Image: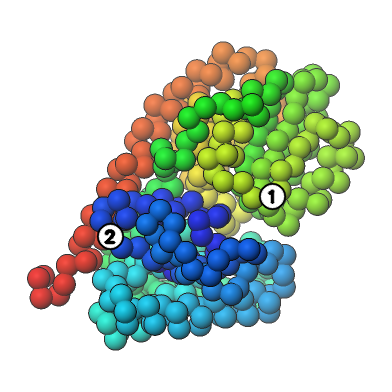
């Protein structure tokens, strides 16, 4: 596996798939980025981890991003080619973004016959447009990234993605081969088995966990909390995650008089610990702003809240609505802090109805169980692992 990011920290999708492959008998290696104090190479739960001397930086400019992504791709190509000489991989699984990371796997394909999987976590042109807008540089970059996306879709032996709306879009964008869906479902292995002291905190607890960046709309949660604090005096907002928006959110919370009410946990925590901390929350929030990128977003934290039985307030964006109904989660107008505040009040005023929706959402989520996605992924590996002669 190749992933432009740390492993296993911060990459639950990659970790789920790696564990599923290892459990099915595959020898799995992951080439990834390196965080401070992490070893260059280690064996973790039977998975070989090979970390390159690069760390992802948040909030950097365009040319720094280009250097980082291109530099990682070149280093990954060098490391993968060296490993492939010894390991003779049957399959190389490339996680985007960037799509051009697939080029790092071409030597393994051309020289050693490895089959290539492109795993589309997000649409790379849409991510760039979200961050850098539609100016001249943005338009040029969009054309370049769209071309790289088409090339990656052409070179991959198989394409997988996180849900059916993405699969439809990738087919429209030129995917000539099958596009399979392996959802970002909740791996039962990471679910907490006990509540823990933190999970028993009193009050009306509003939680968000994940990346804290402007397009995910976490500022709406803070603004909505400020609007309802008088009617819900025991309200507490808990935000778990790193991101470039954290400093601004701290300042905004102070302006709204939420000192002590808005709690930021911006150091990395294992996924199981985060879920243990949020599991008895009053409400989980999916506040994504309406945007080119978020029209396709299906937040994995939504599935985690549902699996934990937490009532969820969700921005009413197309892909989110495609997976859950009004009697399962409480939708609000995307980008509207006042609408989010009303949704929070609705849950505070009628917790019985909120729990009924949470139970209905949990029933719906059975169709999205990780076991089915893991089995689909392993079948794909089995198909790709068959040698051409055997075919």
- 114 vs 185, left or right, is left
Q: Secondary structure at mark 1?
A: loop
Q: Residues within 10 Å of mark 1 (few under 14, many from 20)?
A: few
195 or 278: which is nearer to us? 195
- Quarter of the image holding residue 351? top right
The residue sitting at the bottom extreme is 111
Q: 108 above or below 46?
A: below
**CA distance for labels 2 and 1:** 33 Å
Percent across and percent down for residue 157 are 29, 71
- Quarter of the image holding residue 109? bottom left
Q: Which mark is residue 26?
A: 2
200 or 141: which is nearer to us? 200
Q: 269 above or below 221?
A: below
Total marks drawn?
2
Percent across and percent down for residue 14 are 44, 57
Name the quarter where the N terminus is drawn. Answer: bottom left
Percent across and percent down for residue 321 are 49, 38
Q: Is residue 254 visible?
A: yes
- 198 vs 46, left or right, is right
Q: 371 above or below 112?
A: above
Which mark is first along the chain, 1 or 2?
2
The residue sitting at the left extreme is 390
Q: Secondary structure at mark 2?
A: loop
56 or 315: which is nearer to us? 56
Q: Residues within 10 Å of mark 2 (few under 14, many from 20)?
A: some
Residue at the spot of label 1: 267
> Which residue is found at the position 75% from the left and 25% from the top?
235
């Amino acid at each position: 596996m190749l992933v432009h990011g740390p492993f296993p920290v911060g990459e639950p999708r990659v970790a789920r798939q790696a564990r599923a492959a290892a459990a099915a008998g595959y020898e799995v290696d992951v080439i990834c980025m390196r965080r401070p104090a992490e070893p260059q190479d280690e064996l973790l739960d039977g998975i070989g981890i090979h970390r390159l001397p690069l760390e992802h930086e948040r909030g950097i400019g365009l040319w720094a991003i280009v250097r980082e992504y291109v530099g990682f791709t070149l280093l990954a190509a060098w490391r993968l080619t060296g490993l492939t000489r010894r390991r003779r991989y049957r399959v190389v699984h490339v996680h985007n973004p960037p799509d051009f990371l697939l080029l790092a796997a071409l030597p393994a394909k051309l020289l050693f016959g490895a089959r290539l999987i492109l795993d589309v976590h997000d649409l790379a042109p849409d991510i760039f447009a979200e961050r850098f807008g539609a100016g001249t540089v943005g338009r040029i970059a969009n054309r370049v990234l769209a071309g790289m996306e088409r090339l990656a879709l052409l070179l991959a032996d198989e394409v997988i993605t996180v849900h059916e709306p993405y699969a439809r879009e990738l087919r429209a964008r030129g995917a000539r081969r099958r596009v399979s869906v392996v959802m970002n479902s909740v791996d039962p292995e990471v679910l907490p088995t006990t509540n823990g002291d933190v999970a028993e905190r009193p009050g009306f607890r509003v939680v968000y966990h994940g990346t804290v960046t402007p397009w995910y709309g976490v500022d709406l949660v803070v603004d909505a909390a400020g609007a309802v604090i008088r009617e819900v005096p025991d309200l507490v907002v808990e935000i778990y995650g790193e991101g470039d928006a954290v400093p601004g959110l701290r300042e905004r919370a102070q302006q709204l008089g939420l000192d002590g009410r808005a709690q930021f946990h911006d150091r990395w925590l294992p996924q199981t610990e985060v879920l243990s901390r949020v599991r008895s929350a009053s409400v989980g929030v999916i506040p994504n702003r309406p945007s080119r990128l978020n029209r396709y977003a299906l937040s994995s934290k939504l599935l985690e809240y549902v699996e934990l039985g937490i009532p969820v307030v969700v921005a009413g964006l197309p892909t989110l609505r495609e997976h859950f109904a009004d009697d399962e989660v409480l939708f609000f107008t995307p980008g509207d802090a006042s609408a989010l505040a009303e949704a929070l009040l609705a849950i505070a005023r009628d917790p019985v109805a909120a729990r009924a929706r949470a139970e209905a959402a949990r029933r719906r989520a059975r169709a999205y169980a990780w076991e089915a996605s893991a089995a689909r992924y392993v079948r794909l590996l089995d198909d790709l692992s068959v040698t051409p002669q055997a075919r």
